[in-house]
Image (tube, rainbow, N blue to C red):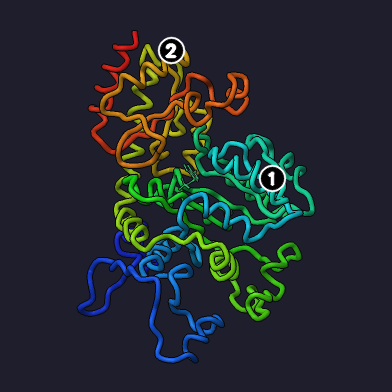
Amino acid sequence: MKEDWNIETQAVQGAYWPENAEPRVLPLIQSTTYRYDTCEELAKVFDLEQESHMYTRLSNPTTDSFEKKMALMEGGVGALATSSGMSATVLAFLNIAQAGDGILASSTIYGGSFTLFATTFKNLGIEVILFNPELSAEEIIALGKPNTKAIFGETIGNPLVNVIDFDKFSKVSKALDIPFIVDNTFATAALCKPLELGANIVIYSTSKYIDGHASVLGGIVVDGGNFNWDNGKFPGLVEPDESYHGISYTNRFGTSAYIVKARVQLMRNMGMAPAPFNSYLMNLGSETLHLRMERHSENALKMAKYLKNHEMCDWVKYPGLEGNQYYELAQRYLPKGASGVLTFGVKGGRDAARKFINALKLVALVTHVADVRSCVLQPASTTQRQLSDEELIACGVSPDMIRFSVGIENADDLIADFEQAFARCK
Ligand code: PLP
């Protein structure tokens, strides 16, 4: 029944269905441990013969409900919550790649993921080939090698707000017989469902719109259950796992093999589990996801139109704005709204952008995006501060660029704040 609900109902009630006289609200189970009557029963849990909680690093009832809701909203077979978005990214790839393997990743991704790939994964012996997502499917396919284990992109890139062409990425993944992994942080299932567009695994920084209130860090990996791992490329999922009495994940867990392995092997060994209280807050935040995403998108479009016509604004990029390079893709893949993040440039370049940000009163300068409060950041003076102007332009971040995460306040108040800030920059 929950599978048939619309996403709005899944967001509100999909996670938890209380029995008679049980709490109406998902309870916070703040316990690391779970009591068992007999050694035999607990042994069954250790042998994966019985599905129940045994230790909160592996699973917890509050986290479990949140995971089930995310899997439901994305249309996956299961999910694994993590302590941050970065740990979800690490886990999603290490579950299928090891030293000697490679990954194809869009170059227009979050800076932290870029650095993870370019340094940490490289040091681990995993070669990540970063490609321009505007290349044709054939050109991307040509970058594939026998050791390539996945293709990766962000639904809406951070910070360039480019929309990926799902048909193209999906074509590459099928041609190379590798999973298509999507970071859906900026769009969320309320606006885009990657698994319906050819993706196999969806990852998130749930610290953003899922929590929505900038109060907790978290991440999640959702398994589409729609990739055949038994194709000769993923022995870790097919061949016996000696650390689990020789079980084969594909034989034992079928379409859930990927997500079960991620939990019982990687989460067990590396331990980037979320605190139950964070899962509780994530779940609470996610109950209003659909409403917030609607308002974020509506406000962002209003602000993009306002900026487009402003004499002190040089340029504005928002995929929901007619004329934007990604407008057609946004219409196709994000018909309910293009989310709340846009970028723009103030006339006068880097210094003018700095002055403008310093003059804002309601809209705050913070190193974050995607929560209810509007905020801005100038990548050139913060996150990309180490890069020269030439390097900034090469990675698509112009020195004057301001990233604007549009909140759910009244857009007229945001415009009034921008007006007074522009006036003080003249
Ligand atoms: N993915 C995207 C698209 C992000 O924007 C971020 C953080 O900004 C991350 C992943 C990493 O998430 P976290 O900060 O929760 O570790």
| Residue 3 coordinates in the image, percent (x, y) | 41, 67
Q: The residue tagged with tag 2: helix, strand or loop? A: loop
Specify the amino acid type for callout 1: Val
Q: Quadrant of residue 248?
A: bottom right
Specify the amino acid type for callout 2: Lys
Image quadrant holding the C terminus, namely: top left
The dot on residue 128 is 1
Q: Quadrant of residue 246?
A: bottom right
Inter-mark Cα distance, 2 to 1 = 37 Å
Q: Residue furthest left?
A: 21
- Which circle's residue, 2 or 1, is located before the other in the chain? 1
Image quadrant holding the N terminus, namely: bottom left
Q: Is residue 254 above or below residue 262?
A: below
Q: Is residue 160 above or below residue 238?
A: above
Crowd band around label 1 with a 10 angstrom C-alpha radius: few (<14), some (14–19), many (20+): many
**Residue at image mark 2:** 347
Crowd band around label 2 with a 10 angstrom C-alpha radius: few (<14), some (14–19), many (20+): some
**Label pair 2/1, CB-CB below 8 angstroms:** no
